[in-house]
Amino acid sequence: MAKHTVVTMPGDGIGNQVLPEALRVLKAVGFDAEYIHADIGWDIWCNEGNALPDRTIELLKKHKLGLFGAITSKPNKEAQAELKPELRGKGLVYYSPIVTMRQKFNLDICMRPCIGFIGNPLNYIRKRTDGGFDEPKVDTTVFRQGTEGMYVGVEWTNPPENVRAALNTHPRFKAFNSVPGPDLAVSVRIITRAAARRIVTAAFEYAKKRGFKGVTICEKPNVVRETSGMMEETAKEVAKGYPGIALWSTNIDAQLMWLNKNPEEYNVIVASNLFGDILSDAFAGLVGGLGFAASGNIGDEVSVFEPTHGSAPKYAELNPPIVNPIAMILSAAMMLDHVGEGAKADRIRKAITEVVQEGKVRTYDMMRIPGGAKAIGQGAASTVQMGDAILAKLK
Ligand code: NAI
Ligand code: MG
């Protein structure tokens, strides 16, 4: 019997192109695992009215480890229109299966490393006053709270009367008192102390492991006093347990400016759900963008690793496929770290480092050319060729 069982969820679109490359790499480093396919995503929604079917939930419950590609999500109207005719009008509501998965299994630690590879032509550079350029090494990992904050889904357009009545008890709601219901939308931001403590602790543990000298809490406590306030207050408490590591605090708006000035100064950032989502995309843009952005959704029991990119439908039908599998492969490496196979993960990252640094094999995104069928003719490597190049370095 294999040591590990991994539930593989390629999902939609390019998820089906990048996940197989990660599996090839995992096999090449000798990861002792068997893989069980599980359904997730848009096609499953259209045919069954549920993008995350119970059988997939059961598999994750049982095996506790998932590798996920990407899914397609569409707005409500289209979700209804594309449902199989016999499922329409039954009150089925589309929910993002990733958000549902995070909430169902309490995958509250969302870890998103944005670490530059030497020689990546997409790396951040900074112009010097003498006209030259600096290319500082960006090595930032964002710890995003994955289950709460702005993404809890407690929201209304035209809130029911009792909700309005409750809101009316707050003096600041007076300004909205006379807005007609259909013209009023409310989304609730929820932070709990326990979840805040867990995400901040994960950030500090990581900083300790990597030997970084500080952790940055990135919120907006001067304005969003209650929820951002609780994040920051909790961070201060947790920081007391890590005397060698400083706690820095930045506001989300200012942080987005500073990451364009001195990104190398931020190694570990912790934030609530929405802010962490924004920050991790922003930092990913400094190290190559979606083709390089990996992530882990880590819970106490279950963990799921995935590239942060989506299903890129416009490229999903291309043959050969052209998208960059590195984000997916790096996500698989994070999975190896998580199950105590760090040496294998390091081998994978080293192989990617070598391929990127050599610069002989580059997918279209790494060449800064438009994606599409013509990319291959312009010298871009296909998804599989990039996988091959990484495999060759592992030999
Ligand atoms: P996307 O991430 O799928 O693609 C945006 C663009 O980024 C692509 O058109 C492509 O130019 C580039 N790109 C993405 N992955 C790449 C890769 N591996 N290599 C090279 N280039 C890459 O985001 P988009 O187009 O906004 O959304 C498409 C669908 O994906 C939507 O239905 C959306 O809801 C869903 N989505 C799913 C996510 C997930 O599964 N975690 C995350 C984001 C979007
Ligand atoms: Mg995102």
Image (cartoon, rainbow, N blue to C red):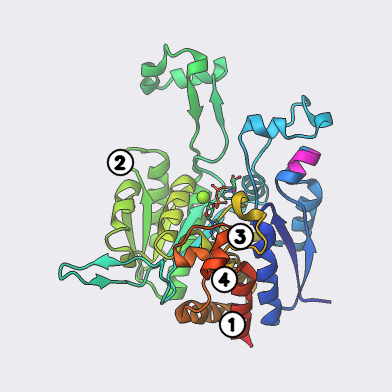
Q: Earlier in the sequence, mark 4 or mark 1?
A: 1
Query: Badge 3: few (under 14), some or many (20 or more) residues near its Cα, within 10 Å?
Result: many
Residue labelled with disc 2: 222
Residue assigned mark 3:
306
Relative to 161, 248 lies left or right = left
| Mark closer to the observer (3, 2) | 3
Mark 3, secondary structure of its residue = strand
Which quarter shows the C terminus?
bottom right
Q: CA distance from mark 2 to mark 1?
A: 43 Å
Mark nearest the camera among 2 and 4 is: 4
Q: Amino acid at mark 2?
A: Asn
For this orientation, the residue located farthest to the bottom is 395
| Amino acid identity at mark 1 | Ala
- Label 2 – label 4 distance at C-alpha: 48 Å
Q: Which residue is mark 1?
A: 343
Report which quarter residue 177 is drawn in. top left
Q: Cβ(mark 3) to ligand 1 < 8 Å?
A: yes
How far is disc 3 from disc 2 in space, using C-alphas?
A: 34 Å
- Residue 198 can be seen, yes or no: yes
Callouts 4 and 1 close, C-beta under 8 Å: no
Decide: marks 2, 4 in contact (CB < 8 A)?
Answer: no
Q: Earlier in the sequence, mark 3 or mark 2?
A: 2
Q: Residues within 10 Å of mark 1 (few under 14, many from 20)?
A: few
- Above-or-below relation of 114 to 234: below
For marks 4 and 1, give the one nearer the viewer. 4
Q: Residue at x 30, y 58 (%)?
A: 260
Three-letter amino acid code of the residue under disc 3? Glu
SS label for mark 2: loop
- Residue span colored magenta: 44-48
Majority secondary structure of the magenta segment? Answer: helix
Q: Which amino acid, by three-letter code, is at mark 4?
A: Ala
